[in-house]
Image (cartoon, grey):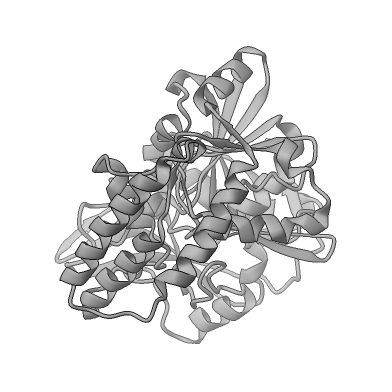
Amino acid sequence: MSLDLLLGLQWGDEGKGKIVDAITSNYDIIARFQGGPNAGHTIEFDGNKHVLHTIPSGIFNKDSINLIGNGVVIDPGIFLKEIEGLNKYKIDLRKNLFISKRAHIILPTHKIIDATSEASKGKKKIGSTLKGIGPAYMDKTGRNGIRVGDIIDDSWQLKYNSLKEKHLNIISNFNQSVEISLDELEKDFFNGIECLKSFNLIDSETYLNNSIEQGKKILAEGAQGSLLDIDFGTYPYVTSSNTTAAGACSGLGVAPNKIKNIIGIFKAYTTRVGSGPFPTELFDSTGERIRKVGHEYGATTGRDRRCGWLDLVALKYSVQINGVTELNIMKSDVLSSIGKLKVCTSYLIGDKEINYFPFDIKSKEVIPQYIEFDGWDQNITQVKSEFDLPKELKDYISFIESFVKVPIQLISVGPDRIQTIYRDK
């Protein structure tokens, strides 16, 4: 009777999708607990590459149930496109994919509010993906939202029209025009609604708790990363939901004492998409090399990811607030042949050196303090055992473990599911 939890520990894009896909066979149910289609989980296998936005990353395992939990916000139009993209894999989606009736729906006008609000901020913009996520969560907390369970009743469109009018009034107050066609958005939206109706819409909290009592194994999958958490991230440059371990309880309706293992995913370096503070960011040829070798471009937006050295201050903070029990290090292969490597172990703010993640790193000058490591020249993408990894990488991994005091159980050496080393620790 257990529920394991898999989380990103940085600013997202850590490789959660690959790991969920790789370990899905160990679980009966994969459950997504927060976020919306601003997340992009990239999965590669058998020469194929697929990006998921709303559907859990276990969908390619035909023996697992995949659940979109109540903490998720769903864009029906994007959901429909995802379903169409999966049809070629011959997966029985009506059998293997369940959707919580309590999940909220992203309306076309949510996207327009998102775009006009971001445009009105000018240089102070947050870096939103413009998917309508923030406005949808605002309606959720403002008790105005439309939930998946509402669309079963034909009268739901009355609520839709009322909320749409309210949104159009909000949009007019921005005095900011954006080139987005509401008619086109609504066409995709209503087609997506019909698609949603064809799936198993369930009381997911009851289903999950019954499954736990029946002894089934569940993996809760997060989106985005811990440093984008609405409470504990680099506010206001964050997402609109709780991306940390606590969010899994409220996003699925399971109690904290049902969680067993908390798996934290992080890259061997650090990246960030969009605006916001990033102490270890590199603006030189090394940062550009990491971006090119690591293909660091947003899975959802295509935007360049900002790249920098591994920030152990931030990583230790994420480990603490999530209660991480084991770590997975991703993209270690990207650091091959770079030369000297650095990791940040403290911050210098003014004349004070601190070794914790503070309330504010956006308005003050934060100077990262580094420890330097020897790099390695070996191509490790085909390595199958940790014993065949270069000594320099093993030293790098050992230092991270000693700093954050949590063992690294898995080492990723490439994007494919088979390019994964499982450690016996």
Percent coordinates x, y for residue 177 in the rendering: 27, 80
Residue 418, picture quadrant: bottom right
Q: 34 or 405, which is in the foreground? A: 34
122 horizontally vs 398: left or right: left
Residue 371, picture quadrant: bottom left
Residue 48, picture quadrant: bottom right
Percent coordinates x, y for residue 51 in the rendering: 64, 62
Q: Residue at x 61, y 74 (%)?
A: 295
331 horizontally vs 174: left or right: right
In this orientation, does residue 267 appear?
Answer: no
Q: 50 or 74, which is in the foreground? A: 74
Percent coordinates x, y for residue 112 in the rendering: 34, 68
Percent coordinates x, y for residue 57 in the rendering: 65, 48
379 horizontally vs 364: left or right: right
Quarter of the figure that contains the N terminus: top right
In this orientation, does residue 280 appear?
Answer: yes
Residue farthest to the bottom, as pictured:
285
Q: Residue at x 50, y 72 (%)?
A: 301
